[in-house]
Image (cartoon, rainbow, N blue to C red):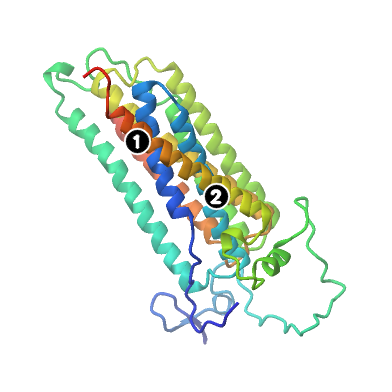
Amino acid sequence: MTHQTHAYHMVNPSPWPLTGALSALLLTSGMIMWFHYNSMFLLMVGLISMLLTMYQWWRDIIREGTFQGHHTPVVQKGLRYGMVLFILSEVFFFIGFFWAFYHSSLAPTHELGGCWPPTGIHPLNPLEVPLLNTSILLASGVSITWAHHSLMEGNRKQMIQALTITILLGLYFTILQAMEYYESPFTISDGIYGSTFFVATGFHGLHVIIGSTFLIVCLLRQFYFHFTSTHHFGFEAAAWYWHFVDVVWLFLYVSIYWWGS
Amino acid sequence: MYYKFSGFTQKLAGSWASAAYNPQGLKPVASSEAPPIIFATPTKFASETTSYDYAGKNKVPELQKFFQKSDGLPVHLKHGLPDQMLYRTTMALTLGGTIYCLIALYMASQPKNK
C-alpha cells in the first residue's frame, strides 16, 4: 500500500459499471425479444450477467470496507449521504403510485359508477390479513432495533437472534401477501382499482423481498464477524431500508386497504 | 457539580453524576479506554483466545492481511483464480450477449413481410 495523507478512498478501476450497464441493455432488449418473439434467451443472459455483476460489485465493496479499511469516517459519511438520497428517490417512486391512486379514487369517473371502490369491485377486508401484515412489519421494526442495540453493545448472540426474527417476519409477510394475491377476488386487469392496487402493493412487495435479501446478507456478514460495535454501516443501511419499507406499508394500509375499501 | 458533553449544543452542560459517567443512556456503549499498545511481536495473553462461536472462527484478521498485500492487483481480482474465472465469465457473457443483442435488434428492424 502506498502512503496516502488523506482519509478518502481512491477506488481501483472497476469493470462492474460497464458490465452492469451492458446487462441493463440485455435485460431490456431481452424483454422486447421475449414479448415480441417469445424467446427468453437474451433475457436469461441479461439476468445472469446482472446477478453476477451485483454479486461481484458488492463483494468488492465488502473487501474494500471490511478487509482493506477504506471506509474511514469521512468515507462512511459519503455512504450515509448516498443511502439517504437513494431512499429519498424511492420515496418519490412510491409517491407516484399514491398520486395515481388518489387521482383515481378522490374523483371517481362515471365509468367507475362515480364511487370508490368502483362498482363491481369487492375489496379485501382491511381488518383480516392486511392488519396482520401491519402488525408483522411493526414487530419486525422492533426486532431490528433490538438487533441494532445488541450489535452496539457487542452482544453477538442476541444480535443474531433478533436479526433472524426480523428476517423470518419479513418472509412471513411475503408469504401472506402471496396468499392474498392468490385469493383476491379482483385482478390487475380489473380497471383502475386493480391497476393501482397491484402496482402499488406489488412494488412494495418487491421492496420487502429486496429488504429481506439485504438483511440476510447482513446476517451472513454478522456470522463472519464483519461487523464491530462501532463500525457496521452495512447493517445500518439495511435497517434504514427496512424502516422505509415499513413506513410505505403503513401508508398503503391506511390509504388503499382501509380508506380505499 | 458534574458536567457532560451535550451533543445538541456541542458544549459542556451541567448534569447528574450518573449521566456524567454514562452520557449515552443506560449503559456505556463505547469503551473510553485507550486500546492496548501492540508491539511488533504481539504478546499473547492466556485470556486472549481466538473468538470461536457456533459460526466458526473469526477469519477477518487473516482476510485483512490477505487483501492488504501489495501485489498490484485490483480489488476485483485480488483473490486469484476464483476471481479471474468469475470476472472472465461475466465479461464473456455481457460482451457476447451485447453482440448477439445488437444483431438480434438489427434483424428485428428488418422484417421480411413489409
Q: Which mark is residue B77?
A: none
Residue picked out by circle 2: A144
Which x, y percent locates residue B93? 51, 42
Which x, y percent locates residue A101? 24, 32
- Kindly identify the residue that appears in the image at 49 percent across and 22 percent down: A179
Badge 1: chain ID: A
Instruction: Give the secondary structure at mark 2.
Output: helix
Q: Is disc 1 surrounded by few (<14), some (14 to 19) or many (20+) residues within 10 Å?
A: many
Residue picked out by circle 1: A252
Look at label 1 and name its amino acid.
Leu
Q: Give the answer, above or below, for where B26 lies relative to A138.
A: below
Q: Is disc 2 surrounded by few (<14), some (14 to 19) or many (20+) residues within 10 Å?
A: many
Taking the image as shown, residue A244 lies to the left or right of residue B3, namely left
Which x, y percent locates residue A180? 45, 22
- Kindly identify the residue that appears in the image at 48 percent across and 32 percent down: A44
> Which of the pair A95/A10 is nearer the observer?
A10
- Give me the C-alpha separation between circle 1 and circle 2: 21 Å
> Which of the pair A210/A149 is nearer the observer?
A210
Q: Earlier in the sequence, mark 1 or mark 2?
A: 2
Look at label 2 and name its amino acid.
Ile
Instruction: Give the secondary structure at mark 1.
Output: helix
